[in-house]
Image (spheres, grey):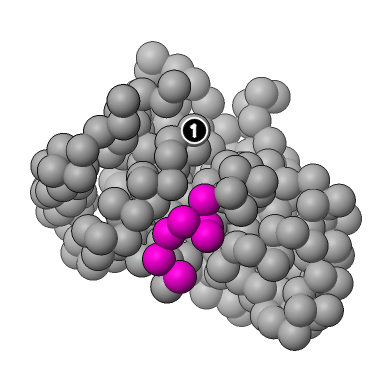
Amino acid sequence: MFIEYDTFCLRANALVLRIAELCQLAGRSPSEVTLLPVTKNHPAAAAEYAARYGLNAVGENRVQEAIDKIGLTPPALRWELIGHLQSNKAKLAATHFSRIQSVDSEKLLAALNRSAGELGKKLPVLLQINAGRDPAKFGVEPTEAPRLLEYALHQPHLQVDGLMTIAPLSDDADVARRTFANLRGIRDELAGRFGRPLAELSMGMSSDLAAAIAEGSTLVRVGTALYGPRE
């Protein structure tokens, strides 16, 4: 059975407080960090709870799973794709998502740009960087990030908001912190080189929230701490 809304509120309140505490430790304002609930493998009620609580967007890993839920949730709620996207699903993704966080190839950029153009929209994206150099993770290698960004900036129907990464699974908290510090460094270097702010740094989940906020995350993707384990 899925959790009740009151349970979600208790967890969300605790998480908002935790984020504020971590920001204070890092010398940052809590307003600098956005909480993105992740609804993967949870019913549409998970997204509805987030909207009722006052959160503006949710994250979903799969295109079709999001499409199945969108019609059952408030129309003002924004959906962000955080899972791997194949270029043959670019049109569906561009149609239904407000932002794609997992863009990791020129082929995908071209497909999204073409689809966004056909839809008459400018689609926000994040470039996914494998900042932890984990062979099990998607994302372009750090050395390829400048080339990918340059290509992305030439796509007229895309808007590059920043970068995203997923830290390697590890019992060593320093692994996540090094990954996030590396992404921040990559962002700073790219922003200087290309003259673009790349303000969004999407990094950190339930298990590595503290490291992400300490290293400058502006968006944390949280599922388990809000909804419990996935089925």
**Along the line of sight, the residue nearer the viewer: 87 or 167:** 87
Q: Left or right? Give the position of 156 relative to 11.
A: right
Q: Left or right? Give the position of 161 relative to 144.
A: left
Magenta region: 69-75
Q: Left or right? Give the position of 58 relative to 207.
A: right
| Residue beneath the point at 69% across and 67% down | 95
Any magenta on residue 151?
no
**Along the line of sight, the residue nearer the viewer: 171 or 78:** 78
| Residue beneath the point at 25% across and 60% down | 52
Residue 176, percent from left and from top = 43, 31
The overriding secondary structure of the stretch rendered in magenta is: loop
Could you tell me which quadrant the C terminus lies in?
top left
Residue 180, percent from left and from top = 45, 42
Could you tell me which quadrant the N terminus lies in?
top left
**Along the line of sight, the residue nearer the viewer: 200 or 25:** 200
- Residue wearing tag 1: 41
Does 178 sit above or below residue 143?
A: above
Q: Is residue 181 visible?
A: no
For mark 1, give the secondary structure: loop
Residue 8, percent from left and from top = 21, 42
Q: Left or right? Give the position of 2 relative to 158.
A: left
Which three-letter amino acid code belongs to the residue tagged 1? Asn
Outermost residue, bottom side: 120
Residue 114, percent from left and from top = 85, 72
